[in-house]
Image: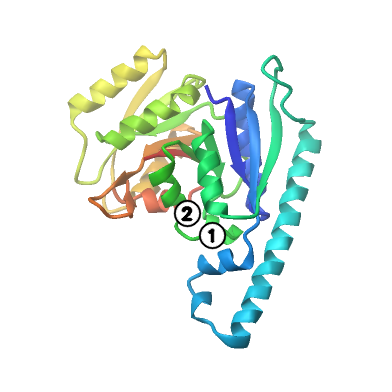
């Protein structure tokens, strides 16, 4: 079960998508939502920038002042978003092991923000994050790093529209260790589904019929109602194929694995992990 859900807030509009998605999942498990906000001091924020380290003199001081002020504004906004969320849904702090229902809290960090975020992700069952994180003041490439280093699943909140009820997942099957692990980590949510659609995309490296039959049997043994569909990329981006397949079947979120190629830090799932991290209308539960 997902009993501890982490919801990082950046102080931007995406906070609302993150909180809505976290609440939709938490209600299925009477879980606790722990919000997290990191206020990077100007030096830490500058080190995560691609341009500021090359500045000197007055331009550098001006940039640091800007980062400091932006950080304060984002902290104030994150706190405001958290308070409005609690008030809107009448949520309060965790009442102990005997307490029922969804509870909520907030953590703040002012030093080594990314390291602190990774620490808390490792100690929660599921983390709900916005995409792309860089627009909310966190370093570019953070989602890829979290996938590589946390060992836990990420739920990427939708970029627009309302969050669904997480009732019908589209499971993106590829016969890899990462995809098998992602399905295992998603199992608590899959068991809550009324219908599961398993999709394979032929992008030139199609999974064998034996592997598809095996994963279908595995899901059926969990008591899931599973239908299979096979799609051809036909020159399209894999993420576009998956989004279209989800729309055709009425699925309201995706489950997929993120693999690594050799020793490179770039994450790949066929051709679409980068697409999944950066864009997409549906929530995506993804793990490495």
Image check: 91 left or right of 159? Answer: right
Q: Residues within 10 Å of mark 1 (few under 14, many from 20)?
A: some
> Is label 2 in a helix, a strand or a loop?
helix
**Which residue is at the front of the view, 79 or 282?**
79
First along the sequence among labels 1 and 2:
1
The residue mark sitting in front, 1 or 2, is 2
Is residue 188 something one can see in this rendering?
yes
* Residue 192 pos. (x, y %): 52, 20
Image height check: is 206 above or below 138?
Answer: above
Please name whichever residue, 115 or 221, is drawn nearer the observer in this view of the structure: 115
On screen, residue 270 above or below 287 = below
Q: Residue at x 44, y 57 (%)?
A: 141
Asked if residue 282 can be seen in this view, the reply is no
Percent of width and height locating residue 122? 49, 37
In the picture, residue 35 is in which quadrant? Answer: top right
Q: Residue furthest bottom?
A: 57
Reading the image, the residue beneath label 1 is 134
Residue drawn at x 75%, y 49% is: 79
The label number, if any, that marks residue 120 in the structure image: none
Q: Residue at x 52, y 40 (%)?
A: 121
Task: Name the spot of residue 119 as percent of width and height, x first.
Answer: 52, 42
Q: Who's the residue at 42% across and 29% down the image? A: 185
Q: Which of the 4 image quarters holds residue 157?
A: top right
Q: Residues within 10 Å of mark 2 (few under 14, many from 20)?
A: some
Residue 23 on image: x %, y %: 65, 33
In the displayed structure image, the side of residue 179 where residue 6 appears, left or right: right
Quarter occupied by residue 31: top right
Q: Label 1's element? A: helix
**How many numbered discs?**
2
The answer to whether mark 1 and mark 2 are in CB contact below 8 A is yes
Is residue 225 depicted above or below 47 in this figure? Answer: above
Give the number of the disc on residue 142: 2
């Amino acid at each position: 079960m997902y009993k501890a859900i982490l919801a990082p807030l950046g102080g931007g509009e995406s906070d609302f998508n993150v909180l809505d998605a976290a609440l939709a999942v938490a209600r299925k498990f009477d879980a606790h939502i722990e919000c997290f906000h990191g206020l990077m001091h100007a030096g830490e924020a500058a080190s995560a920038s691609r341009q500021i380290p090359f500045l000197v003199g007055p331009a550098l001081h001006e940039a640091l002042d800007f980062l400091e002020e932006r950080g304060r504004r984002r902290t104030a906004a994150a706190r405001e978003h958290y308070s409005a969320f609690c008030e809107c849904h009448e949520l309060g702090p965790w009442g102990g092991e005997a307490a029922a229902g969804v509870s909520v809290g907030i953590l703040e960090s002012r030093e080594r923000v990314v390291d602190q975020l990774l620490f808390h992700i490792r100690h929660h069952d599921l983390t709900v994050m916005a995409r792309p994180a860089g627009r909310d003041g966190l370093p570019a490439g953070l989602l890829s790093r979290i996938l590589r280093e946390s060992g836990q699943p990420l739920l990427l909140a939708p970029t627009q529209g309302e969050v669904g009820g997480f009732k019908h997942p589209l499971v993106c099957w590829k016969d890899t260790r990462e995809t098998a692990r992602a399905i295992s980590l998603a199992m608590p949510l899959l068991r809550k589904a009324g219908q599961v659609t398993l999709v394979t995309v032929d992008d030139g490296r199609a999974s064998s019929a034996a592997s598809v039959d095996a994963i279908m049997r595995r899901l059926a043994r969990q008591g899931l109602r599973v239908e299979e569909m096979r799609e051809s990329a036909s020159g399209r981006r894999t993420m576009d194929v998956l989004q279209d397949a989800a729309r055709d079947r009425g699925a309201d979120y995706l489950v997929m694995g993120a693999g690594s190629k050799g020793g490179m830090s770039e994450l790949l799932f066929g051709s679409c992990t980068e697409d999944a991290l950066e864009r997409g209308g549906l929530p995506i539960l993804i793990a490495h």
